[in-house]
Image: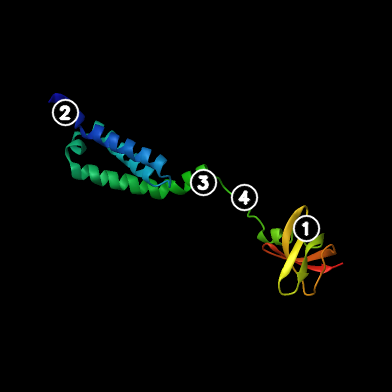
Amino acid sequence: MDAIKDFLKPELIWFLVGLVLLVLEFIMPGLIIGFFGAGAWIVAIICLFSAYVAGSINAQLIIFIIASVLSLLLLRKWLKGMFIGHTKSQQDLTEDMKEFIGERAVVKEKITPKAGGKVEVHGTNWIAEAEEEIAAGTVVEIIEKNNLTLKVKPV
């Protein structure tokens, strides 16, 4: 019976709750649950040193909520930056769209104005469209790129 009383000490219960919450943070990452685990550990430490807090579940819950929410609000952004990393510059999304403009390609399948066709650029076939009909084997110049479709004109 004494073993059960030793196990039901508030500091041990809060420590185990915090441990479970921290393990859940690793299972379901989102950098939120871990702060509640840290809040539970703070309550466990305070219960270890304060008989008043150890005897009052209301005081323990208030400390748990305040410690968890404050740590979440104050530390989440900083820790998220440490785990995810900081970006120094953003990628220029228009750079990819200009990638092939001005290059030459060879028509693999006849290009018609309404149905389009295929061209080969750097060893890869691309869907191509043009304002006029272009026969297979013709060398063309790429004048525009729209996602995976290249707009071409004969050279």
Q: Nearer the viewer, mark 4 or mark 1?
A: 1
Residue on which disc 4 sits: 88
Mark 3–mark 2 distance (CA, rounded to whole Å)? 43 Å
What residue did someone put label 1 on?
Answer: 120
Tell me if I can see residue 52 in this picture. yes
Vertical side of 37 occupied by 141: above or below: below
Q: Secondary structure at mark 1?
A: strand
Which is nearer the N-term, disc 4 or disc 1? 4
Label 2: how many Cα within 10 Å (few below 14, some 14–19, many 20+)? few
Location of residue 99 with respect to 83 vertically, above or below: below
Question: Which residue is disc 3 drawn over?
Answer: 81
Q: How many angstroms separate mark 2 from mark 1 (CA)?
A: 76 Å
Q: Mark 2 = which residue?
A: 4
Observer-side mark, 2 or 4, equals: 2
Q: Earlier in the sequence, mark 4 or mark 3?
A: 3
Q: Secondary structure at mark 4?
A: loop
Rendered view: 28 above or below 107? above
Pick the quarter of the image with the N terminus.
top left
The residue furthest left is: 1
Going from the N terminus, do you reach mark 2 or mark 1 first?
2
For the residues labelled 3 and 2, say whether their Cβ atoms are less than 8 Å apart: no
Q: Residues within 10 Å of mark 3 (few under 14, many from 20)?
A: few
* Location of residue 139 in the rendering, given as x and y in whole percent from the top left corner: 85, 63
Question: Of label 1 and label 3, which has the lower sequence position?
Answer: 3
Q: Is residue 146 left or right of residue 81?
A: right
x and y percentages locating residue 99 in the rendered image: 74, 58
Badge 2 amino acid: Ile
Displayed quadrant of residue 26? top left
Instruction: Give the mark toward the camera: 2 or 1.
Output: 1
Distance CA(mark 4)–CA(mark 1): 36 Å
Mark 1 residue type: Glu
Kind of residue at disc 4: Lys
